[in-house]
Image (cartoon, rainbow, N blue to C red):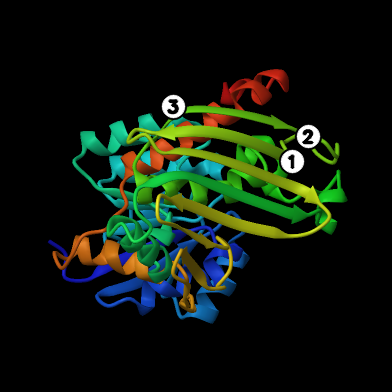
Amino acid sequence: MMRTVHWGMIGCGDVAEVKSGPGFYKCENSTLEAVSSLRVEKAKNYAKRHNVPKVYESADELINDPIIDAVYIATPPAFHKEYAIKCAIAKKVAYIEKPMAQTYKDCLEIIQEFKKTNTCAFVAYYRRAMERFNKVKELIDNKFIGDIRFVNVILYKKTEKEDYCKNNLPWRLIPKVAGGGKFVDMAVHAIDILDFLFGPLSEVKGKASNQAGLYEVEDIVTANWNFKNGIQGTGTWCFTAFENYDKVEIIGSKGKIYFEFFSQNPIYVKTEENTVEYRYNDPEHVQQPFIQSIVNQLTGKGKCNGDLESAARTSKVVDEILKEYRINKNFKEFI
């Protein structure tokens, strides 16, 4: 059992600047010892600003540093499988950015490698540790709105300026790097939380297409599914709409819960008697509570409520929803 978790971080991009990176040195019994990046100057700059002792020119050097106990893989999805398996072989705990890998098949390979060396690993579905989502789970588990009937997830986003740059698209819109588009980047959080709230999704059916023609990957997705406990669900994600709109509705026999997934606006609970709202402010570093739960598990002080198996289920759902689109687009590496 570790007393202090010594972290190394591969990748120094936007997600590591505020959302996650500082959490590794601000958590109790946790330090950030080393960083690496494909652009070493970027790693040096990050290390200087965040007081990280070591900078490595390669991920392999960082992974094999004896002082490193755990590795945060903060790279685009195309590199997740490679670095995760290297961590497993080196018997280093891995914390992998979402999605776990580009395909469910890759996720299963990662799981197999960590089982071989009896090493644990986690995926950055950090909303499982946020107060607002734990409140939703508490309301559901305590049957505040009765028996759950169905769930509806809607997300519309305006087209962003960078989406028009066909020769210089962000990596999240390049299939070989991201495995898909904004659906893969954003909707996985909602799919994971649904798994967290209600259990595994099953009988998943989806339809994806590209309506605006700005890039190769999907820009609109619709889906429906059942949960194994009989609850039904639907989802719509559109990334070329005229407005931004975000809403999750959970309908029960005695009321409903509704909230915006990607904002700090209140959670509303409506019953025949009244409407109650619950307000929560997100932490400065949104991944820090989840990182702390990982550290607590590694130091014997608690347990993280996320694991590789649940993270892999989210990738399986994504694969099912995008299957037809990927076949039609001849994205062979994801079929």
> Mark 1 or mark 3, which is nearer the start of the sequence?
3
Residue under label 1, please give it. Answer: 219
Residue under label 3, please give it. Answer: 105
Quadrant of the image for the N terminus? bottom left
Amino acid type at image mark 1 = Asp
Image mark for residue 210:
2
Q: Residue at x 41, y 66 (%)?
A: 34
Label 2 with label 1: CB-CB less than 8 Å: yes
Quick one: which residue is furthest to the front in this view? 272
Q: Residue at x 79, y 59 (%)?
A: 243
> Mark 3 or mark 2, which is nearer the start of the sequence?
3
Query: Image height check: is 102 above or below 256?
Result: above
Image mark for residue 31:
none
Mark 3 falls on what kind of element?
A: helix
Q: Could you tell me how far apart the alpha carbons at marks 2 and 3 are, in whole angstroms?
A: 25 Å
> Mark 1 or mark 2, which is nearer the start of the sequence?
2
Of labels 3 and 1, the one closer to you = 1
